[in-house]
Image: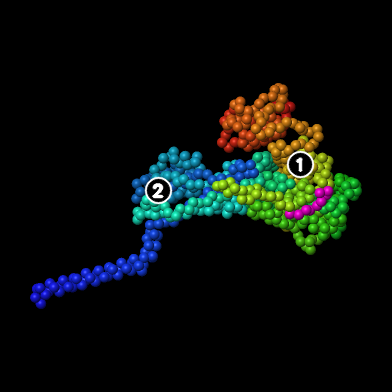
Amino acid sequence: MDGKTAIKVRALLMGAVVTLLFFFLLARLFWLQVVEADWLVARAERMWAAGSQVPPERGAILDRNGKELAKNATAYTVVATISPKDEHRVRDPEDAARKLAPVLGMSEDQILDLLTRRDAYQVELRPGGWKIDREKANQVRKLGIPGISLVETTRRYYPNGELAAHVLGFQSLDGKAVGGIEQAYDQALAGTPGTMTVWRDLKRNVLPNGLKDVRPPKPGKTVVLTLDEQIQSFVEQALDEAEKSFRPKSMTAIVMDPNTGEVLAMANRPTYNPNRYWEVKDYRQFLNGAVASVFEPGSTFKIITLAAAIEEKLFNPNETYLSGRISGPFGTVRDHNRRGWGRITFLEGVQKSSNVAFVILGYQRLGKERLYQYVMRFGIGEKTGIELPGEVPGLLKRTHQMYPADVANMAFGQGVGVTAIQQAVAVSAIANGGNLLKPHIVKEIRDAETGQVLYRMQPEVRRRVVSEATAKQVRDILETVVTDGTGQPYALDGWRVAGKTGTAQKVGPDGRYLSGKYVYSFIGFAPKDHPRLLVYVVVDEPEVDPARGGGAVVAPIFKTIMRNSLLYLNVPQDKPGAPGAGAPTVQPGQAAQRPAGPSGAANATGARGDGDGQTGYMPDLRGLSLRDALAVCGEMGLRAEVHGSGYVVRQSIAPGAPLPKDKRVRLELADFREADEN
């Protein structure tokens, strides 16, 4: 083959190769652009675009007057850059650990372990540096440690600390709703996350106009409770005082509007701070005893037996019987004083809380079947349906399981287990004229953006348990318990109170009653003929001499709560000739006037001369009655912590001083004569 031929062959071969390559490229392009196009585009989008969720803002929880009980707050997480490749890393871990430990409440070793990890670029200094408040974040900033930064985030915040902790529950730092309204209404409060697609280049930088398909989050709904923050505060203060003085095993207090079933306050001891829930050592401290603890009610349960006997026309207040002891198939039942009071009337038997009287009424006259039906009719043995998690139905044997001793004991409140909310609802039926209501602790649910009311609580009558006439007669008799019987320590100046004491000996694990172990209680409502409030207080094993009775422990709690709440609600007094009856009150928008005190002077309390209660300075409340002082505090948005009774003699914030952020003020009250003597 000559040279020209060889060149020609090589040219043809090269042309063929190029042609083949061209057709191969065409085929490859066809394959990529047509056959695999969708797959490749999807793969590219996965590389360039990343979808992410935008968390919604959790809904607030408010009291009935719009005051925030739970909300979202800015928080900060302490982050340390520890990668050796980063010039802004923490260069001296030992020094950093030493400085951070006291601020974050962690040990130096804990922090040092995190700062010396080899498998991370950055680390969060948990738990002490996780979602901390602004004050602690500023302390971290002031340390000026290279490589330590703060990442802004949010956390759930409870402005009033322990107030209503068991009702509210809490949201943990990792977003889990635990207990109370937080758990029961988690879905409504949580809201709906938003979504968006972020387009980035290969270096993960966001491209211009790189936010696509943005769907904003929808915030959680606002839950408005029936609670009144001020009444709740009265309850918390009263329980705190009792806890200091008597160190009981536990306590529960409930305040209800017996006409609507609304719970205005609910508290337990021991309690906890939901802002620092991790400090609780015993998980039982999280339980809401008002709905989750079962106990023998004792003599407060006699109200049900009394109402049943009156409804069945088996009760004659003037009929007499021999007190002290009674025997039968049930064994022997004795009165609480063991010897009784001789022959007394049944009215006196109720007033003295005679067990014998109620065995006659419940066991002998009503009998097993009728008594049992009334107990069930009053809601004992079933859940009330209140909007709180963890409610239990109590303990009520089925009728075929009840022996004579069970029936006799049940007639005076032993051998049956109730929850505090059950007992409060049952007695509310007597206060409101005979209707068993469903209790409520949620008043409204609102759209957080528009304010539209999506749900509004309406009173729900479950059933009529006794007639209006029977309910009135029971109320009249229960008033005599307070005026002439065991309830005398619970009487109030200014209002007629109807109620019943309770002392129940506790049962041990072996089913036997424990010596010296008692649950003391009182349930009462006022004003007697037109009840506005029902208050139930239960105190378990206080450190008090049993000879003094439950009144020494329970009466101060009940009276403080009831008196302060009636004054706060401006409920007219109904006891003729009572001190302060008919006294002028402060209406919203009015300037309060100090009633004439020892000096005879009367001075306006408007701060800095404004007199309209709308300034940012503390008014002078000294010399005001509690009613008037609370009215001024309400106008100012202040939450009053009240101690004593009578007229204000001292206030924790000086007149004219700027109001504190938490709007709390301590008021000490005394009768003017006591103030003069001091």
State the residue position of label 2. Answer: 81
The residue segment tinted magenta is: 462-470
Name the residue type under label 2.
Answer: Thr
Question: Looking at the rendering, which quadrant does residue 618 occupy?
Answer: top right
Q: Quadrant of the N terminus?
A: bottom left
Q: Is residue 133 magenta?
A: no
Question: Looking at the rendering, which quadrant does residue 595 occupy?
Answer: top right
Q: Quadrant of the C terminus?
A: top right
Query: Local crowd at mark 2 within 10 Å, few (<14), some, or many (≥20)?
Result: many
Front residue of 618/372: it is 618
Q: Is residue 468 magenta?
A: yes
Question: Would residue 253 appear left or right of 168 to someone viewing this image?
Answer: right
Q: How many marks?
A: 2
Mark 1 or 2, nearer chain start = 2
Name the residue type under label 1.
Answer: Ala
Residue 221, given in percent of the width and then of the height, sits at 57, 50
State the residue position of label 1. Answer: 526
